[in-house]
Image (spheres, grey):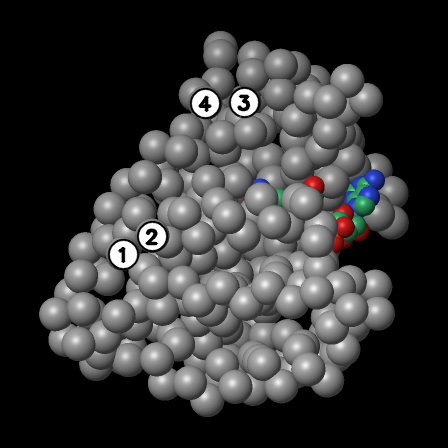
Amino acid sequence: MSATILDGKAVAAQLLRDVGTRVQAAKARGVEATLAVILVGDDPASAVYVRNKERRAAEVGIATRDHRLPASTTAASLHALVRELDDDRGVDGILVQLPLPAGIPSEPVLLAVDPAKDVDGFHPDNLGRLMIGKPRFVACTPAGCMRLLAHAGATLAGARALVIGRSTIVGRPMAQLLLQADATVVQAHSRTRDLRAEVERADIVVAAVGRAELVRGEWIKPGAIVIDVGTNRTAEGRLVGDVDFAGALSRAAAITPVPGGVGPMTIACLLDNVALAAERRAGLVA
Ligand code: NAD
């Protein structure tokens, strides 16, 4: 058996077409979907991420407002900018690109973002709403993973789903989404005793750790669906996931590649959230 490779680029392209249509509908109501992007400092990887997000936004008709601040920016002036954007009725979404420079703790900044404009879904208000099954915005990477699982035709109700990683932005919301889809969820993390045994039992594996090929192909239960969130550079400069892709191919029913799996979905889901915020401002959805 060779696994179906889940093409994140194609699934993302389909979602982005839908986003473009909804953005136009909001525009017809006089609302221009607008995303404010804050980038502090000169981290090259962050600059690439921001450029990709802004390029995709332009393709679907979402306006972006670029706020580039030097690494010497103080926490106080960053907070003041966030508050200004919170109050700006022309802004639908606010994205603070992480990581922030060492001197600026990220948590207070993320807390300052108006939850109604928190298109990343990182604010505790939005995480709490997800927890009670009434999400306003779902964090983009887990939302993208759910769409990939739907695309794979995964039956989630009753399935044993393993989420590896418990970060606030990926692992935890991912486990919540799977739970709400009626999966039996196990959350593994750095203190899990026998990761192999957990993987061997799982019908669905979502790996979000950040350790190259931690999950060996021979651990995968035959027929399992594998979503690999990890992005890691090998010593030779190759981009690989948290799962041994070549080894898993002969066992899994479906698997996401790295790159080209979860990554494109994350950006598409961010823009889906911006479109949703604009639809709300236009009175098109509740
Ligand atoms: P994080 O560092 O915040 O969390 C990593 C998690 O892995 C922790 O909860 C930790 O407990 C767990 N962990 C560490 N070692 C482990 C082990 N040996 N066994 C089991 N669990 C272990 O990272 P994050 O922000 O959640 O990101 C995880 C990975 O996903 C990274 O590689 C990141 O680059 C990638 N990522 C990709 C996208 C995308 O769009 N493709 C988006 C977000 C994150």
Measure how far apart labels 1 and 2 are at the Cα level.
Answer: 5 Å
**Figure quadrant of residue 270:** bottom left
Of badges 4 and 3, the one in the foreground is 4
* Residue 154 left/right relative to 174: left
Amino acid type for the residue under numbered disc 3 = Ala
Q: Residue at x 70, y 53 (%)?
A: 42
Q: Residue at x 41, y 29 (%)?
A: 7
Q: Residue furthest bottom?
A: 87
**Callout 3: 10 Å neighbours few (<14), some, many (20+)?**
many
Q: Residue at x 68, y 45 (%)?
A: 44
Give the structural element (helix, strand or loop) at label 3. Answer: loop
**Callout 4: 10 Å neighbours few (<14), some, many (20+)?**
some
**Figure quadrant of residue 98:** bottom right
Do the residues bearing badges 4 and 3 touch, measured as CB atoms within 8 Å?
A: no
Q: Which residue is mark 3?
A: 252
Q: Position of residue 32 (x, y in %)?
A: 26, 70
Position of the C terminus, as image quadrant, is bottom left
Measure how far apart labels 2 and 3 are at the Cα level.
Answer: 36 Å
Measure how far apart labels 2 and 4 are at the Cα level.
Answer: 29 Å
